[in-house]
Image (cartoon, grey):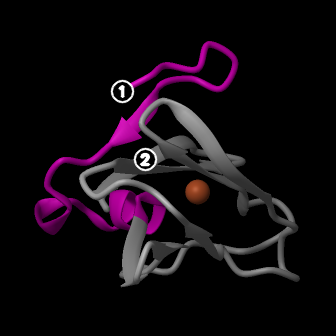
Amino acid sequence: MPESPMLGPVNFMADLESAGDFEKKHTPHIELSSSGDVTVVTVTVGWDVPHPNQPDHFIAWIELYAGEASIARFDLSPVLTAPIVSVAVSLEPGTVVRAVEHCNLHGLWAAEAII
Ligand SMILES: [Fe+2]
């Protein structure tokens, strides 16, 4: 898992089932829906346990990677947007997609799924 010297380490929960509410509200949840060569990747932060969405505590951005390549980025405004984003991708089966989100108070959190 890459480190970001400016934003701190990336938190990655291998076993979300046994994680606490703090980890669950920050770890991205990835859903995949495929049709032909296109897969819609939907990333939700706070899927199981809602994350605050207030001016002083919110999800600032969500990025999506295919392997090490950045393929999409969403900058979010607090209160007016919900931390749920979708993007259609055309990737080879077996490609690992990684969602990374940044909470303005609690740093970077990531999750992975395989196309
Ligand atoms: Fe947070």
Q: CA distance from mark 1 to mark 2?
A: 9 Å
Q: Are marks 1 and 2 in contact (CB under 8 Å)?
A: yes
Q: Which residue is nearer to you in this view: 98 or 40?
A: 40
Mark 1 or 2 closer to N-term?
A: 1
The residue beneath circle 2 is 110
Q: Secondary structure at mark 1?
A: loop
Q: Which residue occupies the extreme top position in the image?
A: 5
The residue beneath circle 1 is 1
Q: Which residue is nearer to you in this view: 47 or 100?
A: 100
User: What is the quadrant of the N terminus in the image?
Assistant: top left
Residue 62: percent from left, percent from top: 65, 55
User: What is the quadrant of the C terminus in the image?
Assistant: bottom left
Q: Which residues are magenta?
A: 1-28
- Residue beneath the point at 72% across and 63% down: 58
Residue type for callout 2:
Ala
Residue type for callout 1:
Met
Residue 66: percent from left, percent from top: 47, 44
- Residue beneath the point at 72% across and 52% down: 73
Residue 86: percent from left, percent from top: 61, 76
Q: In which image quadrant can residue 32 be found?
A: bottom left
Q: In which image quadrant can residue 17 be found?
A: bottom left
Image position of 53 (left or right of 107): right
Q: Which residue is nearer to you in this view: 58 or 85?
A: 85
Pointer 1 local density, CA inside 10 Å: few below 14, some 14–19, many at least 20: few
Q: Which corner quadrant of the figure contains ligand 1?
A: bottom right
Residue 2: percent from left, percent from top: 44, 22
Q: How many marks on residues?
A: 2
- Residue beneath the point at 41% across and 58% down: 27
Q: In which image quadrant can residue 30 be found?
A: bottom left
Query: Is residue 51 highlighted in magenta?
Result: no
